[in-house]
Amino acid sequence: MWKKKPFVAATVVLGLLLLFLFIKLIMPCKEYHFEGGYAFETGVATSNTVIYDGISLTPGVYRIELAYETDTDLGAYCNVQDGTVYTGGLLCNGEHMYSALEKTEYEMWLYESTENLQVVLTFAGNGNLTTGNLKIVETNQLWTMLLTMVLFGAAVFYSVLAFYYYDKEHPVSKEKKQVFFFLAVISFIASLPYLYGCSYTGADLTYHLQRIEGVKDGLLSGQFPVRLEPKWVYNHGYADAIFYCNALLYFPAVLRILGFTVTASYNVYCIFLTIATVWISYYSFSRIFKNDTIGVICSALYTLSVFRIYKLVITTAVGEGSAVTFIPLVIYGLYRVFSEEPKEPKYKTAWVPIMLGYAGLIQTHVLTCEITALVTVIICLIYIRKIFCKDTFWELAKGAMGALLLSIWFLIPFLDYYVTQDVHIKHVSARTIQSSGLTLAHLLFHFWNNGAHTPADGSGVYHSHPVGIGLVLIIGLGLFLILWFSGAFQKMDDGFASFTKRISLIGIILLVMSLNVFPWDKIQDLHPVAASLVSSLQFPNRFLGWGSVCLILVFGFCLWYFCSKGSKAYWIMVAVALLGVTSSGMYLLDYVKMGQGYYELYNEESMGFGYISGGEYVIEGTDADKLSFAKPEVYGDVELLSYEKGCLQATLTCVNPSGEQGYVDVPLLLYKGYEAFCQETEEEIELTYGKNNVIRALIPAGFEGSLKIGFVSPIYWRIAEIISALTIAMLLVTGWKYRRKKDVKKEMQ
Amino acid sequence: MLRKKCNRFVLLLIAELLLILLLIPGCFRKEEVVFSVVGEDIGQSVVSMDTYKIFSSEMFSLEPAVYQVRVQTRLSEGKSLYTELKYDNANFNAVKTNGVTIFSGCEYTDFEVYVSDTVSNAYMQCYFYGSDTNDLLQLDIYKTAIGNRLLVFMVIIGMAILDGMLLLRKGILEQRVTKKQQIVLWTLTAGVLLAYFPYLTDYFSLGADSLFHLERVANLKETLMNGTSLPVRIQDRWLYEHGYAVSFFYGDLCLFVPALLMLIGFPLMTAYKMFVFVVMAATAAVAYHCFKKCVKNEYAALFGSMIYLLAPYRIFNVYSRWAVGEYTAMIFLPMVCCGLYLLYTENVESQDYKKHKWYVIWGLAAILQCHIITTELVGISILLVCLLFWKKTFRKQTFLQLTLAAGLTLLVTAWYWLPMVYMLGSDAYIFQALPQTKMQSRGLWFASIFQLLPNKGSAQNGMVQCEPVHIGVGAFMLLVVYPVWKFLAKKKDGICTFLAAGSAVTIIISTRYFPWDGIMEIPVIGYVISAMQFPSRWMIVATVLAAMFAAFFFEKVIMESGTLGKAFLACVAAITVVCAVYHVNDVAFESGAVYLYEEENMGTISVGNGEYMLQEVALSELRYHEPVAEEGLEWSGYKKKGTHITISLANTSGKVRYLEVPLMGYKGYGIKTEKTGADIPVIAAERGSHGDLRIEVPAGYEGTIQIAYEGLALFKAAEVVSLVTLLAMAGWYIYMERRKVQEGKKNG
């Protein structure tokens, strides 16, 4: 195969391209210095005042560093512009200016040589603003970005060619090709919102983009895994990653490091998430039904489900949207555990999907994981007799243990902080959720558009966000119940029908739990723990995710039932599914394109650094609105001689000549893990909560020296990370061995 | 095994019965006061503005139950009071209630509060507009037995559904219920749920005529509760309790359903929504039954009935126009079509031929009591059919049955139409004086007929937000394809052609291209036509004809065409359903949520143009007021319950004096006195100011009188005629059934 002409030609071209890119990468980056200054008149607002112009640059990714002095925060905005390059040739959103900073530091993407780049400033007129010298620093990110794209393109090209030749020698079945084709079509359609070169705005978009940037900044600061996002909350560091696992966000974060813009990285991530959802749901459902066509249909129903589009595209709830990817694995695992024959050899692998599904859920969205645990408990209770069967119990235990070990690197810090830190999320139990519940009409709604608001306080369906599951799934459920009612499954004594019956009931329960008639308020009244758990759900509509999965399984079962009977109803059901997907999912996607706002974000600085949604992970009592870029504040007789601030760390040289203890407030939010010591004596310095819960270093009487403050993961976090790493390694080895054993067996047969 | 199951079923029935018996005593629980406050003790002022002050009472707790707030006031001219029950920290939807505005002259108001979960911090809040706390005489909250009644009712309904489902399942498992019947049942159920979709919420939304019809329901209930007139002619609470003769001119037949539900204790909104569900179910069932009777094919009937049930015009009438009269009349339209079809196509010699007229009789009688304009349209249509098929019309048997149908319809509905006709002739009403507006411009644009995805609609002219006044694209496709099919298949089919042509013609006359303005200039005809208001009302006829045509055409295609034909029908079915889904989705999406529990919250003057008010009455002049007496006439002991007044009078003037009471002076009011003879008060021939009923009190009269709506002797006679006809028909039916049984026995 490697000797085939197209391979050779492609390899030569690829080699040349890679050579060119490597040369570019090792070449030193240029810096451009411009001297000058501009003083803005106080009280006079100006827009796009040109500070520097006529700047000549070749294509590349550059960092703009404009020196400035101002006494207000967010009062001015610096950007670049160029009327001579083609549309899209210059990508940059600029950066706000802050009193505590001395220069801007934002990136711009220039894809065409220019002679007339301008640096411009918009000033609101408040306070003073003077600008100084300009430095433009070339980075090699254009080439790392190109290298990434070339390698990806090469991988795709080689895969296609390899498949072409493999198919010639060992013909791949038509069915498999069809499956691949349809899954590709579903992936493409579901990815459409991410192919417009922008990010659709949802309530949570900025928050999740900050999370991605947080991972990027954390990685660049040398943290791995990233625990505190260093630049978030105006360089104060935020413990989002401890509470909200960002395992999947390493992918877009790495893309950012490689030079891709914020929007591009986010969109690529969402596309990959979509493709993963398509394949995982196909895998799970086709295995459940042992039928590829039903697997494809269920995959389409799932990937283009109203709930998934609502979460991922409309509210841009990346965590929940990511978690949706793993739910089918859990249901597949549960199906295997409870409906397969424990004595069969293949039963011993039933725990694997449960483990993978749960690990995926824990590491993407804890709330969805809570709901999944609830569903699992209900299923286990329904199958209580089977639970006491040794094999079944063992498979479930293996699944649970595997998921725990894979996620322990996240769970230990999470529990550690949850128990020891008085974070705001622990104080939200008074928030009620029942009024945000849905009406029955929401569940049956079919032609959704993006709407204007989430249902709350009796607003009903009127201009509601698409909070539903779509009529098609309800049709499937209705049909299933009618068949069940009519005794159609009486002669089916296998575990499959019985499993689906139970799943249909669980699906109904979950749908009811999403309604505003479900007594959530009453449950909250029962006990403080219940109040806290219910409150943390925020919206009853979260149950629709699992509700959708259950109902898709039920729909698939109807298809499977009619298919096995050779009934014409099978084709009617296929038509209904197709009609449903096109007139509900695709209709909604079209409407999103028309009705949803969007951002084109290139550099993270343009987003600001302060948005933390509900501020769930700050220490209780912190007033996030009062936090901004800041300098250290000294108290008592302490004299600060020097100060240097890095990511999650600071070095101070100070003197406390008095006989009393003094202290310094450093602009870092205090969380467990921060340590401070005197660099000269290595003596530990006590840290405590300062003004607005920032780090307060207590400077002993007579202290003189350098003080280093930094974040260090506790040792037991590290042990947990090693356990997870070992578990992954062990699973890979076991999986590889299992596969080899299977292949050998096959060859022998 | 079967016996065991039967026993289980009996046990279930016994358990259900016991449960009901257990719950029933609660319905007779005595009312108890849970909160009571006298006037100025209402509490502290929480807000004090120039134009109003807000006072809040002390807190009290409410257990789950239905409560009644009773407010006694004495508000002088220009003052008003708004009162509502409020609460702190209650669970979502724990309390369902609206506030109520009390105007000057209204001395007593009550309204319900539905509490489904314990509320520990409830309080009454009163907004005094120009008034002060002294104007509030008493405010009491009573715990009532309404909640128990509701529980019993819902348990009975729930059990009926459960038992029905169990019996159905048994029938299916024992193969007594065929697969075809199951498909029909489930499809119709799905269709009803689909058509009902916008109300699968905990609220509803208002439409064009919503307040008028809600008032009709609420005031019908009020009148029934007061027992002031039966059959209801004047509804009590309307127009600041002056009474409104809406029941004379707008039949209440179907509205008894929500009114009775309200009497049980359901809030207005719930009762109305339940009523709409009943209408949907009845429409589906009646259409299916009638079409099946005609086509004699279950699937064809199902197809036709679904096209009818999901027709955009019908759904539009229900949710956007709130055309209660029109959409209830649509339940019965298929009956008239079915009866006429059978009378004109069945063998006149057959034994069953005489039975066909009953469809026409019951259908027409019901339509008449639902909506007069629809009756007009149906009447004109029947007349045209009779003329078109005059040969068959004048066959002896057919003519006899048609005459009988017309006669019996008139007799059975005499109680309704005869008083209406009398009232029309004896007084002058506002609707008779309304200017005749040109209606051609209100017709449909041709393009709007082709609207694929019907939306909620909000405009009658033009295409922007165009109202979905059409038969539905599925039905339209059938109409378009039929001539092609007929031409290609070279088939002759009279009924299909007639129905298709009828539907097409009525669609055409619904448009603005038909010369309605010219026709309106023809004397008499113009007057009749102007009552239609919009040419698009003909869409009601077009819809039923198209649905019936769909059923017949379906049967033809299935019987005579191959796969292509079946595929076409499948497409039509799919398009019909998809369009209906879109329609109901848009209605739900574009309709704001309204939570209306109390009829008192609506006020009393939602009369539209006030069509049935006396011409001399100006709506803006009406107010709550006490009786107004001339000098020298003194009154006391005034009590008013609906349109029933008790009052003591003393005429010391030595001359005849007049008393005006707050009742609209319709014909039919009567006076009862303790005394007899000539010198007793009578209803004066002339009405008082703004049309009030005027009592002529002879000189020197002293005594207590009772004023109530009694109706006229003619009305009573008409009621007797209708009752006798109904009894005779019931007797005839029983006789015929018994004869049939006996003949059956004879024939072995």
Image (cartoon, helix red, strand yellow):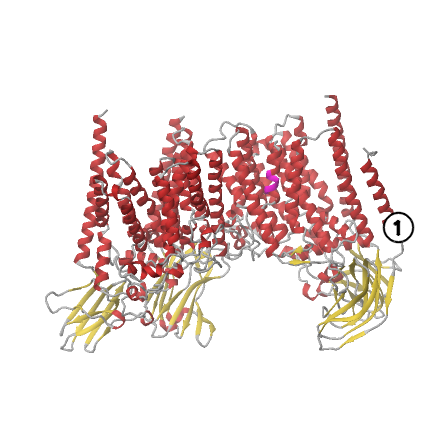
Magenta region, residue range = A297-301
Q: Residue at x 37, y 46 (%)?
A: B501
| Left or right: A533 as drawn, with respect to B720 | right
- Look at mark 1 in the image and give the residue it sits on: A23
Report the magenta stretch's main SS. helix
| Neighbours of disc 1 within 10 Å: few (<14), some (14-19), many (20+) | few
Quadrant the N terminus of chain B occupies: top left
In the foreground, A495 or A668: A495
Q: Position of residue B425 (x, y in %)?
A: 21, 62
Residue B716 covered by magenta stretch:
no
Chain letter of disc 1?
A
Instruction: Tell me the kind of residue under disc 1.
Output: Ile
Q: Is residue A128 above or below residue A179?
A: below
Q: Quadrant of residue A388?
A: top right
Q: Can I make out residue B67 in this image? A: yes
Q: Is residue B200 above or below residue A236?
A: above
In the foreground, A313 or A404: A313
Quadrant the C terminus of chain B occupies: top left
Q: Is residue B584 above or below residue B518?
A: above
Q: Position of residue B358 (x, y in %)?
A: 26, 42
| Left or right: B322 as drawn, with respect to B393 | right
Q: Quadrant of residue A721?
A: top right
Residue A300 covered by magenta stretch:
yes
Q: Can I make out residue B323 in this image? A: no
Q: Quadrant of residue B71?
A: bottom left
Q: Position of residue B130 (x, y in %)?
A: 40, 75
In the foreground, B265 or B56: B265
Q: Residue at x 87, y 62 (%)?
A: A31
